Image (cartoon, rainbow, N blue to C red):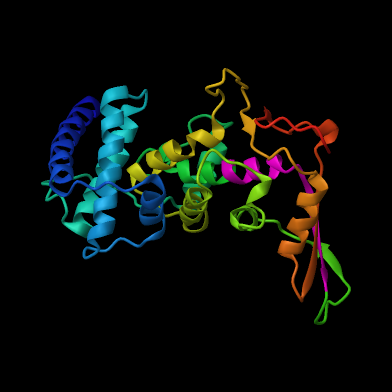
Amino acid sequence: MSDIVALLRMNFMLGVKEKVDAKYEEIKPSFTNAELSKLIYKRQLTSSDEELKAAHIQSIKRQLDKIYSQGSPNLDGIFLEFSKSITLFDELTKALQIEGGTYGDNFIASRDFYLSAVRSFAAYVPIFYQGDMEFACIPLKLRLAIEVYFKNMIGYIASTQEFLSGKKIGNVAPYPLSIADLLRFFSDMRYSKYCKLPIDIDILKNINFWSNNLVHTGVISFAWQNLEAVELLEPLFRAAHEDGRSHLKGFNYLSAGFALSDLEKDLNEFLSNKSRKVSVKLSLPLNKPIEGEFYYPRKGG
């Protein structure tokens, strides 16, 4: 039965690809990566938003073209999630006028997350999510990858805050440094000098914003959004470069011409305000990165 279902799904996806190719040729969308990420990761989908529908069509076509040209060891799982996503997308937008479809969960229940954790060390643990949960959790994994990357890039150790007003004045408590804080800091023109990333930081901000939806609600994304995010983030996590250098743990893109203490000072000033004084501690022992190697060799501390 599963082989028959998989075959039917493959036939359905072939029909989808024909519809997507035809629609793409009709509207010919040509968004840049930055424009595309802002649209498909930050704007709410409605049937009347033609620009957003066009952006999704561009992403759907790009990702389907890659799937059909490169293949995947998890093709059945990808097609299952893609079929569900296309069905929902077309119901919302009527953009493709597809006949038939695949229906299933559009969110991951809390118990399925729990059972997935149990399943990592116990046998015969069922998961009741109607789809490929490993694929559906891509946003969660990318969200974690972005945060860990930036904190390791700057050598983050710890952060505290001293309250400057209110009932807690004078008290010192941990400060929860977030990836949103760091992305805002590095996207500020005053501080963008501290790193030279191989990816537009606005794309990172858009993907981080989108990935929080699964983290906080359990609602899954369209399949092509998952694949598009992986593709857009690839330059940041690249293990090899055109100049011949390679490292299994990738590269740290901190700029070379400043001391780490300068970055620490500016970051603390950026995060502090009238009600709190933030103190972030950074350290890169022996001037070596926590992950991989520096893309721009550093000489100072």
Residue drawn at x 72%, y 43% as measured from the top left: 154
Report whether 167 appears left or right of 179.
right
Q: Residue at x 55, y 36 (%)?
A: 236
Residue 122 x, y percent position in the rendering: 56, 31
Q: What is the quadrant of the N terminus in the image?
A: top left
Q: Residue furthest front?
A: 257
Q: Which residues are magenta?
A: 145-163
**Residue 176, percent from left and from top:** 71, 58
Residue 213 lies within the magenta run = no
- Can you say whether 143 is above or below 15 in the image? below
- As displayed, is residue 71 above or below residue 209? above
- Which of these two is toward me, 235 or 81? 235
Q: What's the residue at 26%, 64% (across, down)?
A: 46
Q: Position of residue 71 (x, y in %)?
A: 31, 23
Does residue 5 appear to the left or right of 233 in the view shown? left
The verdict on residue 150 being magenta is yes
Relative to 6, say whether 243 is above or below: above
Q: Is residue 11 visible?
A: yes
How many numbered callouts? 0
Name the quarter where the C terminus is drawn: top right
- For this rendering, which residue is in front, 165 or 117? 165
Q: Is any atom of residue 84 visible in this view?
A: no
The residue that appears at 31% across and 36% down in the rendered structure is 63
Of all residues, the one furthest to the bottom in this rendering is 166
Would residue 57 appear left or right of 236 to someone viewing this image?
left
Q: Tell which of 90 and 286 is nearer to you.
A: 286
Q: Position of residue 39 (x, y in %)?
A: 36, 56
Q: Nearer the viewer, residue 138 or 155?
A: 155
Farthest residue in the right direction?
Answer: 170
